[in-house]
Amino acid sequence: MDATTTTRALRYLTNEEAAMFLKLSPRTLDKFRVLGGGPKFRKFGRRVIYALDDLETWANSRICESTSDDNYFLPR
């Protein structure tokens, strides 16, 4: 594993940073944590953080090629 991969694997984002990365509202991520369907997160006391790799995995799992794709109807 090279230095870039190591740095990337250790990168964590706050709720606000993760929302900016995904171009979503922080409230949307809040709702996903309550209702499910959002990216994996980590909770340390009151602090919620997201691993960059988990955000990318979640975003990539939602790729659609047309409106008839199964992923198209997942909660937004």
Image (tube, helix red, strand yellow):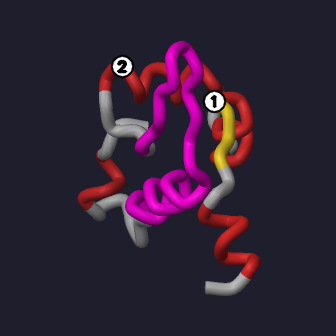
Reply yes or no: does residue 44 show up in magenta. yes
In the rendered view, does 35 fall on the left or right side of 55?
left
Q: Disc 1 residue type?
A: Asn
Q: Is residue 19 left or right of residue 48?
A: right
Q: Quadrant of the C terminus?
A: top left
The label on residue 71 is none
Q: Which residues are magenta?
A: 40-62
Camera-nearest residue between 70 and 59: 59
Judged from the image, the secondary structure of the residue bearing numbered disc 2 is helix
Percent x, y of residue 12: 65, 46
Q: Which mark is residue 15?
A: 1
Q: Is residue 15 above or below residue 74?
A: above
Dot label at residue 34: 2
Quarter of the view holding residue 75: top left
Q: Residue at x 41, y 58 (%)?
A: 62
Residue 6 image point, x, y percent: 66, 71
Residue that protrudes farthest toward the bottom in the picture: 2
Q: Are marks 2 and 1 in contact (CB under 8 Å)?
A: no
Measured as percent of width and height from the top left, residue 23 is found at 68, 43
Instruction: Give the residue type at disc 2.
Output: Val
